[in-house]
Image (spheres, rainbow, N blue to C red):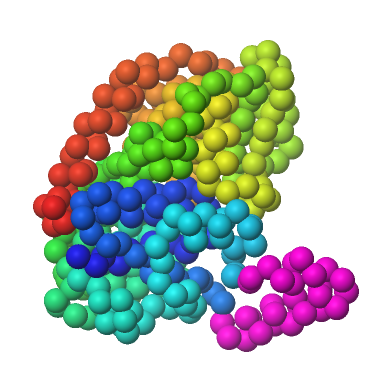
Amino acid sequence: MNIGIVTQPLIVNYGGLLQNFALQEVLKSLGHNPVTLDYMSGLTGFTYVYKQMRRAVSYLLGRWPEFLYPYKEGRSNREIIAFIEKYISTTHTFWGGYSSSLVDRYALDAIVVGSDQVWRPMYNRHLYDMYLDFCRSEKVLKIAYGASFATSEWEYNARQAKKCSKLLKGFRAVSVREPSGLDLLRRLGRDDGRVVADPTILLGRRGFDKILFGDESPVACRDYLGAYVLDPGEECRRALEDKKNSLGLESVMIYELGKADVGPVQWIDTIRHASFFVTDSFHGTIFCLLYHVPFATVINETRGAARFRSLLEPLGLEKNLVHRFEDIKDVGCDVDWNNVDRYFAARRAESLAFLREYFG
């Protein structure tokens, strides 16, 4: 079966890229041919020409490496593009919205929406396409896998709610990533939603290791405190330095959103080798759990707090969740990793069962 995947744009977003990669790998393991519909947000024809003119000027000024590098909006990181080209099957890159022609052009039998924050209005310029408004064919199987609202708050206006409720009627099955999403789904007229695991949990540590790291020797812990922070600041840097000193570690390795010139593989590698990791990223937290790395997660209310709580509360790890960077000093290293593994194994089995109902 040819399966199209609709998700957030493939840009410098490690969690977004890795959840997409993971979902593709799981669908491949079920015997299907997944392809991600490579939508890039906000790049109009005028914007493209303007950007290319700027690159031409750079070339004339002698900045040839930047000019020669293939331009894709939001993909200025060479490692990001290399990862996409090597590990993620995509359609041609298109801008400004989805087209109904995609279904025929790629002979799609089904479309899966998910995961990430695909159903959060503030993060989607083309929200209705995330509910597959562009696909009117009744022959195409429509499934939502782990679609996330990210928050437990109702953020839809009346027009959006009416339109999305109508589009949801065309889905054969819907599932969300957070339990709080079930209540939001009911407000959109679907009371048959299910909760499934994020695709990165579904693929799991063994899946990532096998594909990305091959037969590499077992992970050895290094003496550094690692950090991946979406919204850094002076408070954050002071807190990291204090935490590093309190743990007796040698250095702080920090990646900031949009500033780290590393790819998803190096990003995972930094997490799995760390002695302790600090992040305000949802997927950063997941990879700490997958690789048994002691961690502290700082809640980012604006980016969506419900997803952090739904991930850590069932594990009894609320103590690892703090609201301010200065509070990471109180987070210890004691985590029952056996409990984490058991919980993820159960979630993985339930979630795989959901996919097999329609793609088995």
Q: Magenta span has 50? A: yes
Residue at 44% over, 49% down: 18
- Residue 26 higher or lower than 289, as above or below: below
| Residue drawn where x is 25% and y is 73% of the image | 108
Magenta highlight on residue 336: no
Q: Position of residue 335 (x, y in %)?
A: 42, 17
Residue 163 to residue 143: above or below: below
Image quarter (top left, top right, bottom left or bottom right) of the N terminus: bottom left
Q: Residue at x 26, y 24 (%)?
A: 342
Q: Is residue 145 above or below residue 296?
A: below
Region of the chain picked out in magenta, as a range: 44-71
Q: Horizontal and vertical percent for residue 267?
A: 56, 41
The x and y percentages for residue 41 are 51, 71
Q: Can the viewer see residue 195 in this picture? A: yes
| Residue at the image position 59 percent from the left and 69 percent from the top | 73
* Nearer to us in this view, 354 or 90: 90
**Residue sticking out furthest to the right:** 61
Q: Residue 278 lies in what quarter of the image?
A: top right
Q: Is residue 178 visible?
A: no
Name the magenta segment's main secondary structure.
helix
Residue 358: quarter of image: bottom left
Tell me where residue 355 appears, x and y as whole percent.
19, 51
Classify residue 109 as left or right of residue 160.
Answer: left
Residue 232: which quarter of the image? top right
| Numbered-mark total | 0
Give the camera-side residue of 123 and 172: 172
Q: Left or right of 55: which side holds 133? A: left
Q: Is residue 231 left or right of residue 305?
A: right
